[in-house]
Image: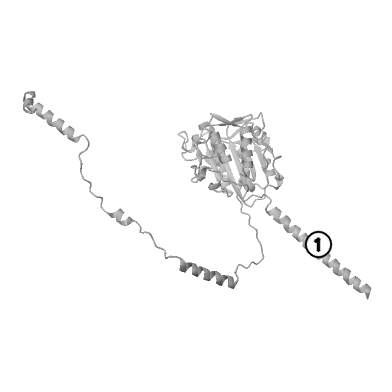
Amino acid sequence: MAATYVLKHSATTLAAFLFLSFVSSAASHIEDQAEQFFRSGHTNNWAVLVCTSRFWFNYRHVANTLSVYRSVKRLGIPDSHIVLMLADDMACNPRNPKPATVFSHKNMELNVYGDDVEVDYRSYEVTVENFLRVLTGRIPPSTPRSKRLLSDDRSNILIYMTGHGGNGFLKFQDSEEITNIELADAFEQMWQKRRYNELLFIIDTCQGASMYERFYSPNIMALASSQVGEDSLSHQPDPAIGVHLMDRYTFYVLEFLEEINPASQTNMNDLFQVCPKSLCVSTPGHRTDLFKRDPKNVLITDFFGSVRKVEITTETMSLQQDSEIMESSYKEDQMDEELMEPLKYAEQLPVAQIIHQKPKLKDWHPPGGFILGLWALIIMVFFKTYGIKHMKFIF
């Protein structure tokens, strides 16, 4: 009898232990799923896209920037979260054989200008000072919202830059330049002011890798089209337009992005491989040591898209309130309505009458100098008729 009791007690204890283990593993699994679900830690996306070159022969730099603009908009980032800076307006350039267009593919296959491009900084507004002010938020209070980077500590930011550069600098407007130290310090200010969660920096210029060598702020991933000492080459010459339409690195990056959709699971490691030296001629580079997450766990859409995090569940959820709560809230609403004064509409202007009424006749007044001119005419006629000998009868 005692042996039977001990056996039953042991079985009960084992069952309880197995049940607790199952519950613990299920909870751990749910936590892992939740951590995977919110692995990026960001709640919104922003993009700052900058073309720093002027003049018609730099057509490709404008096309580079507009092509990235088109891709991020297609993947879900709205214009309200994009700061677009174009140093020249190629669409309206007198040399453009197709006005109001900018093409990124030869034979004029793809117009990246379109009807819905919102340029925030154009022409001489694209300066080093304005660019740094946008990043750090140090802009005048009168600056409109469309020209502000209103990011926070839960924002993932894509910064794309293209133009002419050298070892440690990028030219703006062929008149000034930003150095890699200035750029690194701007990113540090952004981090200290909690203006980003994670930042992806992409630059397409000669010796582009030199621009991210001085970065020291956390959570920054950087890509460049060329190493120090290398040129970044152009691509897609078009005889009809007379210039190259894009740069090689940006062309192959955008070709890769065309295969991405908002639900894509493609990661950053795939982006690192899109333009090998056999295609780009230059050697693209990337830097990930400041970035906390493994690039293979970072989705492309964490920076190029604006995917809303939605969890799908098969469980039934009751959204009906308790009857007593509903009744009390209904009574409170009735009391509020009784206490409120009846709404009165302001008297509107008689627009219809104003539009259809006849214009009021104005009083006529002689124009300025009319009286003086009339007297001069009378005197001239008098002299011609009577001569100067009759002047003594007037004065």
Compared with 237, 360 (above or below) is below
Q: Quadrant of residue 220?
A: top right
The foreground one among 364 and 325 is 325
- The answer to whether 218 appears left or right of 86 in the picture is right
Relative to 20, is 369 on the left or the right? Answer: left
Q: Residue at x 73, y 58 (%)?
A: 30
Point 10% across, 26% down: residue: 383
Q: Position of residue 345 (x, y in %)?
A: 39, 61
In the structure shown, which secondary structural element does the residue marked by tag 1 occupy?
A: helix
Disc 1 target residue: 21
- Estimate the x, y position of residue 228 in percent, counting from the top left: 67, 30
Q: Nearer the viewer, residue 247 or 304?
A: 304
Percent position of residue 346, x then y: 38, 59
Quadrant including the N terminus: bottom right
Q: Quadrant of the C terminus?
A: top left
At label 1, the amino acid type is Ser
